[in-house]
Amino acid sequence: MLHRRNGFFRTFLRIGALSLVAWLAVLAVMQQPQQAADGPLKQIRKKLIAKREAGDPAAPLKQSELLVSLPPYVNTPDGMCLYPDGNIILAVPNVNDQSYPGFLMKITPQNKAEIFYPCPLHPDTGRAYPFGICVGADGDLFYADLQWFADPATPNFKSRVMRIPMQDGKPGLAVPVVSGLVAANAVVVRDGHLYVSDTIMVPDSKPLISGVFRIPLSEEGLELEGPLEKSPYLIATIKTFHEKIPFGADGLTFDSKGNLYIGNFADGTVHQVKFDEQGKPQPATIFARADFMKSADGLFCDTKTDIVYVADSMANAVQMVYPDGSVKTLAQDPENDGTDGRLDQPAEVLIRGKELIGSNFDFPVEGGVNTKFEIPNTLVRIPLD
Ligand SMILES: [Ca+2]
Ligand SMILES: [Ca+2]
Ligand SMILES: [Ca+2]
């Protein structure tokens, strides 16, 4: 009896074990649709969260969210600045589909996107390519008109910076502040001077030589004379060693101590320029680099913390450069179409209140995470608190 009972028990155990296997199989099948619903983006994100918990500086701390889905006539948004009335002015060069014009938009504090300003066309090229934009002390707007895009194969030295006189929040007719650049990109106005980066200053040089110019606002209408690398207005020169992508000095920002930072687009380094008491610039030095910071497009320094936020176009990420030069990833996404508020090749960042706002340029560059341009394009937000 005991024997039989043991036999029965063994059979029971065997059936039980089999059922356990069966149950696991059922569970696995049940879980499959869930994994499919998760999709590759969520699975990648799960891996990144695990990396972050392990203290990896390249693991993103946050995820971007949709701020504004831009209308279809915005195929390539780029530079932004926060106007004192709380509106964001967004530059739209529309280089992905040049059958659309370049113009400026206004994003209200309620995140409504409106057409703000049709940029004047360059008299020679018949085109307008507004990129970096900033606001001066008296409220006038300044934007880079990046005319290299009119004919990238033959640099035309027609890039310029325009000033839009503003009266009661309304734009007047833009006038050239400086012209004769190859690829005017970022602009900052500070202490009566315009700072502008030229991303391709010496075309075809290897390593690529690019730089930053400082022009007194009192010299409005200046036409730079070549060679640009010998210009008395040039205050910083940097080199870019990337083999394939000839884009150097890009984003510009100042920290609370008055140091200037320059994004080196294709090398992904952030350079620093210090000034002496007479305002004389010291040679630009590499301030920050990290193997996971693949490029440095727009820069924005939060002067409360002196963290420099970097739009990392190639890595499809936003990086944070700390005052000690260390780098951490704030947000990063794999290739996606950007419609639901993910990063889609960010070109610029700025802080509005307690959020970082990014503009998704979505203009694929060889070797970058983003390989496809698709509309609608977006502005995204990343909460900073
Ligand atoms: Ca830029
Ligand atoms: Ca894309
Ligand atoms: Ca897109």
Image: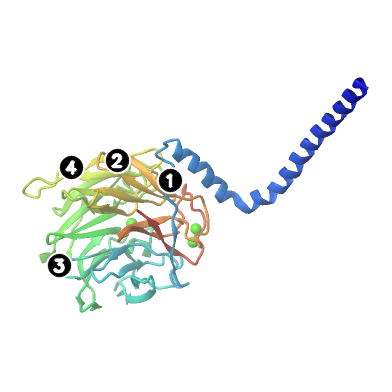
Q: Is residue 69 left or right of residue 107?
A: right
Q: Is residue 273 left or right of residue 46?
A: left
> Which mark's residue is nearer the viewer, 1 or 3?
1
SS label for mark 1: loop
- Report the Cα–Cα distance between label 2 and label 1: 18 Å
Residue 73, image x, y percentages: 45, 73
Is residue 345 something that shows in the picture? Answer: yes
> Which mark's residue is nearer the viewer, 2 or 1?
1
> Which mark's residue is nearer the viewer, 2 or 3?
2
- Report the Cα–Cα distance between label 2 and label 3: 34 Å
SS label for mark 2: strand
In front of the other: 139 or 63: 63
Circle 3 residue: 220
Quarter residue 2 falls in: top right
Amino acid type assigned to the residue bearing label 2 in the image: Ala
Looking at marks 2 and 1 on the same chain, the residue that comes earlier in the sequence is marked by 1
Circle 2 residue: 288
- Report the Cα–Cα distance between label 1 and label 4: 33 Å
Amino acid type assigned to the residue bearing label 4 in the image: Pro
Amino acid type assigned to the residue bearing label 3 in the image: Glu
Check the image and name the residue furthest to the top: 3
Query: On residue 60, which mark appears?
Result: 1
Circle 4 residue: 283
Residue 23, image x, y percentages: 76, 41
Q: Residues within 10 Å of mark 1 (few under 14, many from 20)?
A: many
Quarter residue 124 falls in: bottom left
